[in-house]
Image: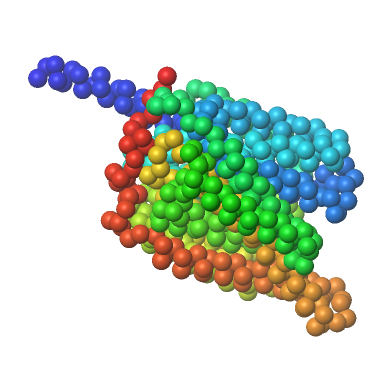
Amino acid sequence: MPQTSSASPATAAPAAAASSRRWWTLTAVAIAQLMVVLDATVVNIALPAAQADLGFSNGDRQWVITAYSLAFGSLLLLGGRLSDLIGRKRAFIIGLIGFALASALGGAADSFGLLVAARALQGAFGALLAPTALAVLTTTFTIPKERARAFGVFGAIAGAGGAVGLLLGGFLTEKLDWRWNLYINVFIAIIAIIGAVIFVSSPKREGARPKLDVPGTILVSGALFTLVYGFSNAETDGWDSPATWGMLAASVVLLVAFVFWQRRAAHPLLPLSIVLDRNRGAAYASVLIAGAGMFGIFLFVTYYLQASLGYSPIQTGLSFLPMIGMLVLAAQLSTNIFVPRFGPKVMVPFGMILGVTGMLLLTRLTLDSTYAADVLPALMVLGFAMGSIMPASMQTATLGVDRQFAGVASAMVNTSQQVGGSIGTALLNTLAATAATDFVASNLPASPEVLADAAVHSYSTAYFWGAGFFLVGAILSALLFRRRGHGVSLHNPEGTAPAVAEPVVAH
């Protein structure tokens, strides 16, 4: 008896230290994820000032955004697989350093070409960093209750990062200079690098070192590049552009070739069993659809607040804070209470229905609407919607995946979100532009009042179609997710592969 009691504290101390180390790991991963997510919107706010400073044309300015999204979207699966091959800690630190250096290069750019090149480099290192961050989380948190909390935090950041970017971008542009929207990443990355060096563990590799599927990498990178480029081209040149349809057709051909190759490859880049699993497939589809629907919130609400209501960039960013608060609240309630009790089959469709409701509330906005009475309720509903969708979907998307494929499975989450954003950008922008043109044509002469009403009408059209995206997501997620007790459970993942379930061992 004396021996047993004296040994208990000695066993408890390392366990408490390991648990503390995991939460510090989450902090480092969350900082890195926030940097990648907010960068997608923080540069948007700085774009007019950068254009005035560097003197590039309206036709060229889209490349500051597109260069990032093309590199990021097309290299995500490669980045995820590289993290499996070279080790997640090493890949995480390389991604952070590369992203910081690319951001510094962009902030110091004295020409349009250098700025675009820096943005492309940001996208390339972001494609390594984003899936690695999620893979680190997946393999670090194996205790069900802790895993739920960790993914609640991660999902909240993934959903709220865009709004944080709007707020930070407005502040930096107004108070400092547009270049600080890029320089700020250097300071964020330094903090994350220190945290990664100290707290992120390096798991021991078991078995032979896996090999990179070069043909599969080329096929899927080309497919994702042409897909994102096709939708980006549709946004700028329209759906009747040969380049748009040519790129989208090429993407389909390359994706089909990729699938055929994965079925016969000895070392597949993305084993088809990962995406064909019913729960994981439903999770990837939910992230894609939510990404497409969410685009309407940030883009068109930003235009409405600034162009129609006359808000400054800082005021616009502050206007999104209540939505962020609701998103964080919903993410914590969802992962700690509702998902363990009801499962993703209930929570994801519930979030999608809330998304439909929030979008329909936004369709009621007019030039006479006020923020408190009309905009705020819709944003709070949408924040709760995203907080219900994203954590449950992200956690399900990486659950039960063998450790050696955790990176590429995590990359599929980011790929789904990126492709969804590209689809949402092209479709909603096209629909909004068409609605504005038709409104002006039916209300000639085109006075300033008519043009202002046409803009609000175009936003309402985008919100309506955004509601349609969420409705499709609600139906698909309700049909595809398994009922609780069928397959791997989120709150008790005993069905996970042994390679995932075992704790991470540091060197």
Relative vertical location of residue 81 with respect to residue 309 in this rendering, above or below: above
Q: Is residue 419 left or right of residue 169?
A: left
Image quadrant containing the N terminus: top left
Furthest residue in direction front, as rendered: 264
Q: Nearer the viewer, residue 118 or 229?
A: 229
Furthest residue in direction left, as rendered: 1
Furthest residue in direction right, as rendered: 55
**Residue at 70% over, 70% down:** 431
The picture places residue 247, in percent across and down from the top left corner, at 71, 56
Relative vertical location of residue 362 with respect to residue 126 in this rendering, above or below: below
**Residue at 39% over, 60% down:** 481
**Residue at 81% over, 77% down:** 440
The picture places residue 361, in percent across and down from the top left corner, at 58, 71
The picture places residue 51, in percent across and down from the top left corner, at 85, 47
Q: Nearer the viewer, residue 278 or 89?
A: 278
In which quarter of the view is residue 243 placed?
bottom right
Q: Nearer the viewer, residue 182 or 56?
A: 56
The picture places residue 351, in percent across and down from the top left corner, at 47, 61
**Residue at 51% over, 68% down:** 472
Q: Nearer the viewer, residue 440 or 358?
A: 440
Q: Is residue 240 visible?
A: yes
Image quadrant containing the C terminus: top left
In which quarter of the view is residue 37 placed?
top right
Q: How many marks?
A: 0
